[in-house]
Image (spheres, rainbow, N blue to C red):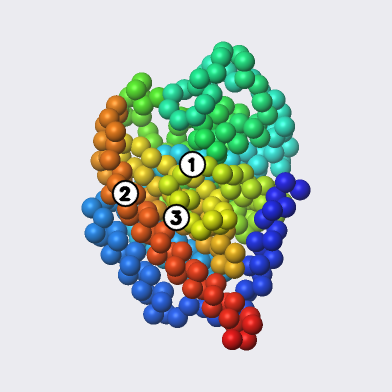
Amino acid sequence: MRARFLLPFFAIIAGWSDAPAASESDKAKLRLEFADLARNSGLHTGIAVLDLTTGDQFLVNPDAVFIQGSCIRIHLITELFRQAAAGRVSLEEIQTLPESARTGGFGVLRYTGRGTVSMSLRDYATLVITVNDNSAANLLTDVLGIDRINASLVAQGTPEIKFRRRAVSRVKTPANTPENVGTPRAVMRALELIYRGQVVDRATSDAVLEMLSLPAVGFFERNLPLGVRFAGRSASGPTFRGDQGIVLLPGHPYVFCVTLEGKFGPLGVRRDYSKADAVITRAAELALAYFQRETRAGSAAGTGR
């Protein structure tokens, strides 16, 4: 099975099921730190962190609607594996990249020749995650159908996440083009469903996790210890920046979603994301420190210390 690498994580996690929970003061401290970070950021900030061992939640503006940018592709990949499990598509089906899917922005397919690229749906998904390829995302969006993606989001209880459009070149995009949007709480729930094995079944959910965990160039991974996997996506645009995913920290995995909106610079100039990146970095540090303490506490309890 392609998701075999995840099994050790679940085995480790199961071993900490009786680990002592953090004190209420520890939880309150983290919630206060997140709230202070958001308030002092100068940006519209949404935070949703979920302890996947205890169920504790740490939320800031959890029901505010934020632009999702490339983070919407978490749900595109999830839908691909959902439809594959239902037999509607085959992950190994070979498709030639049509010109209608080709677009500017992130990725490598925009630079390839006309009619020269043919690969499996799985390989297009791999490009979506590893290099955030817009053209590959468009092909998958057309194959899967925006209406079906949104129907699945509603059916799983996260209607606040709305897939509204394909990837387009910012140069040619009208100002009133609708954005893909969602709330931190809904995104947190969607990621939890994947982790819990509730996207179709355990095998399908593990396959989604494996795809989302592929090495990628993102903001958040830079803040993680070597070897700790992040199953998710980063996003950036002229008015948004964010990281959403599952941190597969051995002993204490957690969902981490930070989404920021502000003005980072117009098209054609070098955008200044320093303020947003500082917020993401600090939020990541706070969350990691908290969950590492939880992991050590569980280890000590397991050995009787």
For disc 1, the neighbor class at 10 Å (few under 14, some 14 to 19, many from 20) is some
Q: Secondary structure at mark 3?
A: helix
Query: Which of labels 3 and 2 is toward the front?
Result: 3
Residue beneath disc 1: 217
Specify the quadrant of the image occupied by residue 266.
top left
Amino acid found under the numbered disc labelled 3:
Asn
The mark that comes first in sequence, 3 or 1, is 1
Question: Is 233 placed left or right of 62 in the picture?
Answer: right
Q: Residue 94, labelled with which disc? A: none
**Percent position (x, y) of residue 250?**
59, 64
Of all residues, the one furthest to the front in this rendering is 226
Element class at badge 2: helix
Q: Which badge, 3 or 2, comes first in the chain's sequence?
A: 3
* Spatial CA span between label 1 and label 2: 17 Å
Q: Which residue is mark 2?
A: 276
Would you name the residue on which mark 3 appears? 223
Is 129 on the left or on the right of 179, as rendered? right
Quadrant placement of the C terminus:
bottom right
Marker count (numbered):
3
Tags 3 and 1 touching, CB below 8 Å: no
Q: Nearer the viewer, residue 178 or 280?
A: 280
Identified at 38% across, 55% down, the residue is: 281
Q: Is residue 269 left or right of residue 181?
A: left
Looking at the image, residue 96 sits to the left or right of residue 104; the answer is: right
Query: Residue 125 lies in what quarter of the image?
Result: top right
Secondary element at image label 1: loop
